[in-house]
Image (cartoon, grey):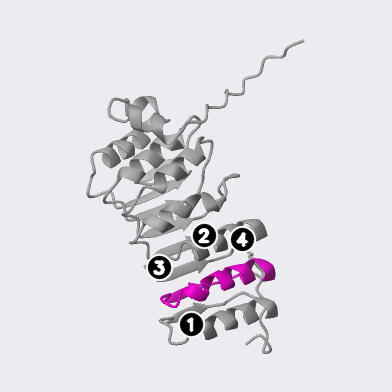
Amino acid sequence: MDVETNRPRAMERREFDYYEARAQDVKLEDITSCEDNAEILQRLRRQDTSLKYLTISDDADADNYIVGEGDDFGWLGYFIGKSKYLYDLRIKSWGEGENIEAFIEGINRNQSINSLHIGTDLRGVSFRNLRPFFRNNNNLYQLEFNFEVGLECAESIAFVLDENRCQSLESLRFEDCNLGEDGFAVIATALRTYPELEELHLQHNNIGLTGCTALADTLRGWGASNLKHLDLDGNSIDDQGL
């Protein structure tokens, strides 16, 4: 016997072309879960120069895109991709939003973002999907992670950093990510071609002797580097590691 449920039907997966074809005529209030989200999309669409900072979250603060049930992230990604004035993007929560892959595809087309904070996992989407963003964006100077990364994700981040060397990157933060020895080792190896880094924040990542050795190898390879700040607070580093 069939049993009816109240679970909402999953939204169909959409490609970037879907949003491109409808962007000029779509009613923003019909594709968002609240008026505030519609207003953010409207400001992005009209290239509002005052919208420089945007946080995706479940906290109801000003200028936050508040994730609600039925929000199609593809639309947000599309308009972010078109934005010329958005400088700082902070992703703290996906909530019940859908079409994250389409969101990532939109982000990949943005060239104005200079600070990217990722405070949640990509919900099954590989970080490698962001390769075009790092390849095409010459303004990114700060990259920050603040979630339980895990080895597989660390390997994906390392792959992207290594394959798409971002020469503008000055500050890299892995804070409370619990990278562990193996996770940090692959990140450290990928950073061998980043002597331009001025800040490296690695607090609370369960880094020990193996991680310190990998970091030391990277720092030696930099030679005359620009590094001004290195934070290893809260790791398992003893005198031998130092």
The earlier-in-sequence mark between 2 and 4 is 4
Q: Dot 1: what SS?
A: helix
Three-letter code for the amino acid on which mark 3 is drawn: Leu
Number of marks present in the image shown: 4
For mark 1, what is the residue? 222
Three-letter code for the amino acid on which mark 4 is drawn: Glu
For mark 3, what is the residue? 169
**Span shown in magenta:** 181-204
For the residues labelled 1 and 2, say whether their Cβ atoms are less than 8 Å apart.
no
For the residues labelled 2 and 4, say whether their Cβ atoms are less than 8 Å apart.
no
Q: Quadrant of the C terminus?
A: bottom right
Q: Quadrant of residue 2?
A: top right
Q: Position of residue 57 (x, y in %)?
A: 46, 46
Three-letter code for the amino acid on which mark 1 is drawn: Trp
Q: CA distance from mark 1 to mark 3?
A: 15 Å
**Up/down of 87 relative to 186, above or below:** above
Residue 169 in sight here: yes
Mark identifier at residue 180: none
Left or right of 128? Residue 83 is left
For the residues labelled 4 and 3, say whether their Cβ atoms are less than 8 Å apart.
no
Three-letter code for the amino acid on which mark 2 is drawn: Val
For mark 2, what is the residue? 160
Q: Residues within 10 Å of mark 3 (few under 14, many from 20)?
A: many
The earlier-in-sequence mark between 1 and 2 is 2
For mark 4, what is the residue? 155
The earlier-in-sequence mark between 1 and 3 is 3
For the residues labelled 3 and 2, say whether their Cβ atoms are less than 8 Å apart.
no
Q: Residues within 10 Å of mark 2 (few under 14, many from 20)?
A: many
Q: Quadrant of residue 212?
A: bottom right
